[in-house]
Image (cartoon, rainbow, N blue to C red):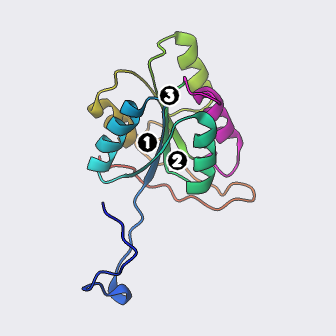
Amino acid sequence: MRLSAEPHPNRHPETEVHVALPIILIADADVDSRVIYSAVLQHHGLMTVEARDGAEALDMALLHGPDAVITETSLPVLSGLDLLLRLKQNPVTAQIRVIVVTADARPEVRTQAMERGCQAFLLKPCLPRDLTAAMRASPDHSGNPPPMSPPPGGRTRTPRPLMPR
């Protein structure tokens, strides 16, 4: 998608309908992983933003308010598990869905990720169909969006499906 500061000559702003696409934050130190995940998700109509480390991902989550975060556990500066914990502890970001995609197959890593609140745990190499299936799944794995109450001092987040089922 090309963005331009110049208005399109055939554009009529007074009649336009603006639809906010779901935003997915991808946090991975490996540029190839970020590029692949972004391409897959953008192909399915989602907007993506990328972070190279956990601290940058936390800043971007606060700035962009993504609908979901995809994170590797092995991130520089702030690990993916610590990122997950901080997101879930902050009332402003607590409702953001988090999917862990990692090369770390140790059972204790999976346990820690699930205990800290991730909605899905996938191992690399992660096939595009597995990533999109995790994105389609509801946060509580029931098929229904979770009840969303406004976080203390935060704005209400309206649950919405990230991808068509």
Q: Is residue 15 visible?
A: yes
Image quadrant occupied by the N terminus: bottom left
Q: Which residues are magenta?
A: 74-94
- In the figure, is residue 2 to the left or right of 25? left
Q: As shown in the figure, which amino acid type bears the numbered disc 1?
A: Ser
| Residue sitting at x 54%, y 32% | 118
The residue under label 3 is 72
Residue 77 versus residue 132 in the image, above or below: above
Q: Amino acid at mark 3?
A: Glu
Q: Position of residue 163 (x, y in %)?
A: 34, 49
Mark 1 or mark 3: which is in front?
3
Image disc number at residue 27: none
Element marked by disc 2:
loop
Magenta residue check for 48: no
Q: Earlier in the sequence, mark 1 or mark 2?
A: 1
**Residue 161 in the image: x percent, y percent?**
40, 52
Task: State yes or no: residue 82 in magenta.
Answer: yes
Q: How far apart are the alpha carbons under marks 1 and 2?
A: 8 Å
The CA distance from mark 2 to mark 3 is 24 Å
**Comes first in the chain, label 2 or label 3:** 3
Q: Which mark is residue 146?
A: 2
Identify which residue, 6 or 22, lies in the foreground: 6
Write down the residue under mark 1.
138
Image spot of residue 103 (x, y percent): 44, 18
Residues under numbered marks 1 and 2 in contact, where contact means CB atoms less than 8 Å apart: yes
The residue nearer to you, when weighing 94 against 79, is 79
Cα separation, mark 1 vs mark 3, equals 20 Å
Q: Nearer the viewer, residue 112 or 13?
A: 13
